[in-house]
Image (cartoon, helix red, strand yellow):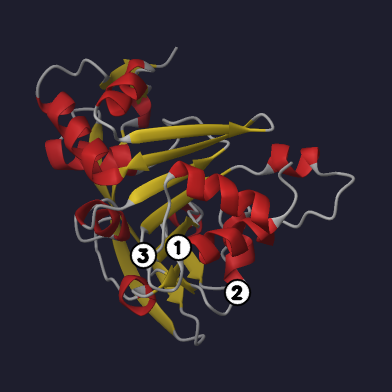
Amino acid sequence: MLSEIDDFVSVFKKLGIKKKDNISVGSSILRILSLNKKNKFKPHYIIQALKEVVSKNGVLMIDAFCWDFCKTSKFDYFKTVNQIGSLAKIALNDKEFLRTKNPIYSFMTFGKKNKYISNIKHYSCFSKDSPFGYIIKNHGKYLLIDLDFRAHAYVHIAEQEVGMEHRFFKIFKGTYIDKNKKKSNVSTEMYCRRLEENIETFISPKFKSLLKKNKALKQIKKNGINFVLIDAYKAHKLMVKDLKNKKKYIYPKKVL
């Protein structure tokens, strides 16, 4: 089953996660919750398992993305709730985690480089000096819990590096309230889609085979739940190469 901390520890170790690793986490735990309706499972078990496997000598970054800043021009360290997954909400109440500074693409961070990563000041959401870039540069991995292998934002770092005709840089400005309740004015730049063109970035399912061929992806299924671990550095190189050359696996696609 997937009901105890040790169950998740076992899965993460089988995936190849180990102490001192740099791990970025994206998740959907709805089906895990459904499987455990009659058990004493708590969502924080997943976080506890990750902390145990990676240890304080590693790095954990949990997606805490929220696009409200684009509309409201307001961000509050504690009150702005992430819009994908529920693990970040749990991490927000864990004193061992800190939240990164970007008002749109923030992460909850844990581990040895906690203070450093949470204090990264990057103007552009998907730049090389962002937390995304930290994971790639330091040969980290991104863990996807019950998500499609394509359900991650790391492709946008490759797109920004290469330059895509269906995307453009847009600046968002607003107020930022930090963890000490200090208010300041901030601005951030995001590499956005041109919505009027109805074009999205499509990642072919065949890209999964390419990742496996290059030993950049490992997948485990436990009780019907998918766990995918992707080598961020290798995947980034493969994405940039494809976008620059053939666009065989990753390309703009018109949405009808």
Question: What x and y, as percent, mark residue 161?
Answer: 15, 42
Up/down of 156 relative to 211, above or below: below
Residue neighbourhood size for the residue with mark 3, other residues' Cα within 10 Å, grouped as few (<14), some (14–19), many (≥20): some
Q: Residue at x 25, y 65 (%)?
A: 122
Amino acid at dot 2: Asp
Left or right: 40 as drawn, with respect to 64:
right
Residue ranking furthest to the left: 245
Work out whether residue 109 or residue 184 is closer to the camera in this orientation and state it: 109
Instruction: From the top left corner, tell me how far across and down residue 40 is, in percent.
Output: 84, 55
Tell me the residue that label 2 is attached to: 94
Vertical relation: 152 (above or below) 122: above
Mark 2 and mark 3 lie on one chain; the one further toward the N terminus is 3
Quick one: SS at disc 3?
Answer: loop
Sequence-wise, the earlier of marks 1 and 2 is 1
Q: Which residue is mark 1?
A: 54
Whether residue 109 is visible, yes or no, is yes
Q: Which residue is mark 3?
A: 20
Residue contact at pointers 2 and 3, CB within 8 angstroms: no
Query: Which quadrant would the N terminus be assigned to in this image?
Result: top right
Front residue of 222 and 65: 222
Image location (x, y in percent) of residue 77: 51, 73
Q: Amino acid at mark 3?
A: Lys
| Spatial separation of the CA atoms under disc 1 and disc 3 | 6 Å
What distance separates the C-alpha of mark 1 from that of mark 2? 16 Å
> Going 27% across and 24% down the picture, which residue do you hit?
213
Q: Which-is-in-front pick, marks 1 and 2?
A: 1
The picture quadrant where one finds residue 46 is bottom right
Instruction: State yes or no: discs 1 and 3 in contact (Cβ < 8 Å).
Output: yes
Position of 57 with respect to 90 (left or right) is left
